Image (tube, rainbow, N blue to C red):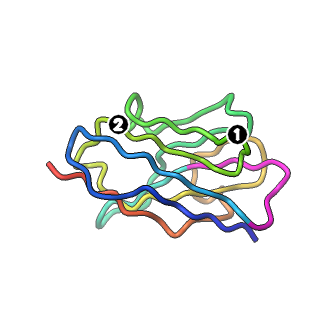
Amino acid sequence: QVQLVESGGGLVQAGGSLKLSCAASGRTFNRYTMGWFRQPPGKEREFVAAGSWRGSTIYYADSVKGRFTISRGNAKNTVYLQMNSLKPEDTAVYYCAAREGSIAAMEAAEYDYWGQGTQVTVSP
């Protein structure tokens, strides 16, 4: 079993920045990809960003392109989401997810493990 723990959420004013972290522990696959999703209040969970094992392929939702950056730690068991120029519409619970394999995916159904989520609130 893989455990994912997110941190770094909080309250920030529009235009500000936050950096989310997600650490994987427990049984980890030889290679696995990690991604970020979010669920705004009253809405469905949506894709935010994901990167392949080697980081050669990275996907972003159109709504966050140019503002958010996903990266992996050197030990590969940590993934980060740097969020800049935050907008009120970025307010959501942000979830880290992991899946076995080296290819990044944008569909939630492709992921096997999920963190508990961290709240990000952006005030106007």
> Residue 85: within the magenta?
no
Tag 1: residue type? Asn
Q: Which residue is mark 1?
A: 74
Q: Are marks 1 and 2 in contact (CB under 8 Å)?
A: no
On the image, the x and y values in percent for residue 74 come to 70, 39
Disc 2 is placed on an element classified as loop
Q: Which quadrant of the figure contains the N terminus?
A: bottom right
How many neighbours does mark 1 have within 10 angstroms: few (below 14), some (14-19), or many (20 or more)? Answer: few
In the rendered structure, which disc, 1 or 2, sits on the residue that comes first in sequence?
1
Q: Residue at x 27, y 41 (%)?
A: 16
Which residue in the rendered view is the most extreme toward the left?
Answer: 124
Distance of label 1 from label 2 (alpha carbons): 22 Å
Q: Is residue 59 above or below residue 118?
A: above
Quadrant position of residue 58? top right
On the image, the x and y values in percent for residue 24 come to 67, 59
How many neighbours does mark 2 have within 10 angstroms: few (below 14), some (14-19), or many (20 or more)? Answer: some
Q: Residue at x 37, y 46 (%)?
A: 18
Tag 2: residue type? Asn
* Residue segment shown in magenta: 26-35
Q: Tell me if 44 is positioned left or right of 28 in this view.
A: left
Q: Is residue 28 above or below residue 51?
A: below
Q: Residue at x 60, y 57 (%)?
A: 97
> Residue 30: within the magenta?
yes
Quadrant position of residue 71? top right
